Amino acid sequence: MTPERLDATFAALADPTRRAILARLASGEASVTELAGPFAMSQPAISKHLKVLERAGLISRGQDAQRRPRRLEAKPLAEATEWLEKYRKFWEASFQRLDALLNELKPREE
Amino acid sequence: MNETLKVTTPTDREIVITRVFDAPRSLIFDCMSKPELVRRWLLGPPGYTMPVCEIDFRVGGRYRYVWRGPDGSEMGMGGVYREIVPSERIVQTELFDQDWTGGETVGTALLTEQGSRTTLTITELYSSKEARDGALRTGMAEGMSAGYDRLAELLTSMMEGEGK
């Protein structure tokens, strides 16, 4: 990642509305109208946020020329962390400790 | 010999993990329900501690866990015990403080013994498919933005330093 790109990504993620837009797009692509729905914001205001996200490479536009749906670009986010992998690592590390603890607690065999 | 951990998504709303332990199930049950034992192993990656581990182990009783990472950041969760069958089964509700799982999930821990070994199966049931998928993806986005929030603070302090 170049410093400029990192800057753009950082700036894009610093805003709660834009994070909410990303969270919405995580469950599937959506048009500008659909995205503006849950926010008390005009479409031009939402479009401005979308432009910032697009420049940061966090979202892109879908094929449908009429709806122009936006979709999440997983890569910049995936670079940071993979939830399921973290989940597995959490349990793997914990269970290894549990093995040791169980060994310690087990009644000594003759 | 330890068995490897398995993580599967058998249905739209579930994540299931299984692991075999070389110990009787009553002992594992103790390790999952007594706070002085829980805080010794339910710690995740190296560097994490559990400053809060409160357990009121009865049906309707609450529990609360807080983890502290190597960088000092804290993550908390808690819930209520719905069902307890000694040495066999614990059903509990789970909610993270940041609620990145899209609402409360229900965790069921099942212990089955085969000879001297015990299989632990933990099933996490999400409120909907969207909630589960949202947890998988939003957790990712949240983790990212949290990282960037810290970076933002660092950059701000660096820039202020430069301006002087």
Image: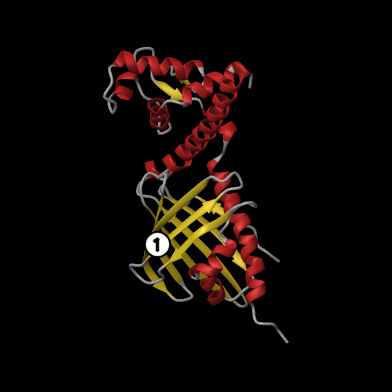
Question: Where is the C terminus of chain B found, in terms of image quarters?
Answer: top right
Q: Which residue lies furthest to the front in this view?
A: B164
Residue to which mark 1 is pinned: B92
Q: Which residue lies furthest to the bottom in this view?
A: A110
SS at circle 1: strand
The residue lying at 35 percent from left, 49 percent from top is B127
User: How is the structure coloured here?
Assistant: secondary structure
How many circles with numbers are drawn on the protein?
1
Q: What residue type is labelled 1?
A: Gln
Asked whether A103 or A17 is in front, the reply is A17
The residue lying at 40 percent from left, 49 percent from top is B13
Asked whether B13 or A37 is in front, the reply is A37
- Side of A68 relative to B41 (left or right): left
**Badge 1: chain ID:** B
x and y percentages locating residue B68 in the rendered image: 55, 51
In the picture, residue B90 is in which quadrant?
bottom left
